[in-house]
């Protein structure tokens, strides 16, 4: 006997706005039971002494350290700019913004 009933499957399908033909309700109830059973088995295997994790291997930050390094000067950065205003790129106005 299935722990999940045919009526429960029909109700969940209706809540999810899924059209499930009546002849498939029993099959879906069995499949959902199998899924619930698999989750139960995994839950038993992971006892209270096993910490919850999102990854099986510990993650390590792989970013490099922030270090000040030489970079382009303002003039070098703006050298190929089509338009410039003071020390900034000049771009066309968009979205009707006020200047």
Image: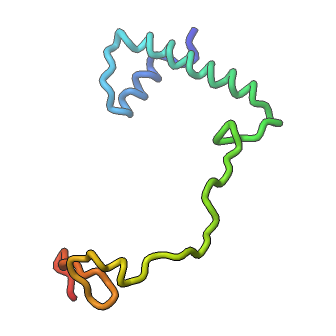
In the picture shown, does residue 47 fall above or below 59? Answer: above
44 with respect to 70 (left or right):
right
Tell me: residue 81, above or below residue 62: below
Q: As displayed, is residue 66 above or below residue 86?
A: above
How many numbered discs?
0
The quarter in which the N terminus is drawn is top right
User: Quadrant of the rendered structure where residue 97 is?
Assistant: bottom left
Q: Position of residue 29 (x, y in %)?
A: 48, 16
Q: Nearer the viewer, residue 71 or 2?
A: 71
| Picture residue at 59% right of the left edge, 22% below the top | 36
Q: Residue at x 58, y 17 (%)?
A: 3
Residue 87: give x, y in percent of width and height.
34, 88
Visual colour scheme? rainbow
Q: Where in the figure is residue 22, as x and y percent of width and height? A: 34, 13
Q: Residue at x 44, y 15 (%)?
A: 28
Q: Is residue 26 left or right of residue 82?
A: right
In the shown orientation, is residue 78 left or right of residue 82? Answer: right
Q: Quarter-wise, where is residue 24 in the image?
A: top left
Looking at the image, which residue sits at the far right?
49
Locate the C terminus and report the quarter of the image it occupies. Answer: bottom left
Residue 40 location in percent, x, y?
Answer: 67, 23
Instruction: State the image quarter where residue 66 is shown.
Output: bottom right
Q: From the viewer's perspective, is residue 8 above or below residue 49?
A: above
Query: 11 or 54, which lies in front?
Result: 54
Which residue is found at the position 36% from the left and 77% from the top? 77
């Amino acid at each position: 006997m299935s722990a999940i009933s045919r009526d429960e499957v029909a109700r969940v399908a209706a809540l999810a706005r899924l059209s499930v033909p009546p002849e498939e309700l029993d099959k879906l109830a069995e499949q959902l039971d199998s899924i619930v059973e698999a989750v139960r088995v995994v839950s038993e295997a992971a006892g209270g002494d096993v910490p919850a994790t999102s990854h099986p291997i510990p993650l390590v930050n792989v970013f490099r350290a922030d270090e000040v390094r030489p970079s382009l000067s303002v003039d070098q950065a703006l050298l190929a700019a089509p338009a410039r205003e003071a020390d900034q790129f000049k771009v066309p106005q968009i979205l009707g913004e006020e200047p």
